[in-house]
Image (spheres, grey):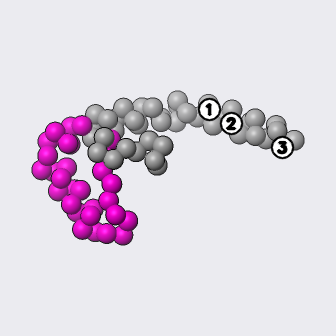
Amino acid sequence: TTDYLRAEENALTCEPGCPESLASGIVRVLDDPELRARLRIEGLATARQFHPARIGPQWITFFTETLEALS
């Protein structure tokens, strides 16, 4: 996920297994309209970059070349 999730830009992070950390992030998004808007805009842009229709052909090429190299 670090390939595309960027803390405070297109995502908020929390401590794994820590409900308080998750709750804090949720409250931040609810209370901060600017943060909410930025996360939405950047999140949608990131989703478009990693849409399966866009990256699917790259994966197919990767796996095809890998299998050919192993043959």
Q: Secondary structure at mark 1?
A: helix
Left or right: 62 in relation to 7 = right
Q: Which residue is mark 3?
A: 70
Q: Which residue is mark 1?
A: 58
**Disc 1 vs disc 2: Cβ atoms closer than 8 Å?**
yes
Where is residue 22? Give x, y as percent: 27, 62
- Under mark 1, the amino acid is Gln
Q: Secondary structure at mark 2?
A: helix
Task: Say which label, 3 or 1, has the lower sequence index.
Answer: 1
- Give the spatial CA distance, label 1 vs label 2: 6 Å
- Under mark 2, the amino acid is Phe
Where is residue 39? Give x, y as percent: 27, 41
The span shown in magenta is 10-38
Q: Which residue is mark 2?
A: 62
Picture mark count: 3
Residue 35, located in which quarter of the rendered image?
top left
Left or right: 59 in relation to 48 = right
- Under mark 3, the amino acid is Leu
**Disc 3 vs disc 1: Cβ atoms closer than 8 Å?**
no
Q: Residue furthest right?
A: 71
- Give the spatial CA distance, label 2 vs label 3: 12 Å
Residue at image point 32% right, 35% down: 42
Q: Residues within 10 Å of mark 1 (few under 14, many from 20)?
A: few
Where is residue 14? Give x, y as percent: 32, 59
Where is residue 54? Give x, y as percent: 52, 30
Left or right: 43 in relation to 28 = right
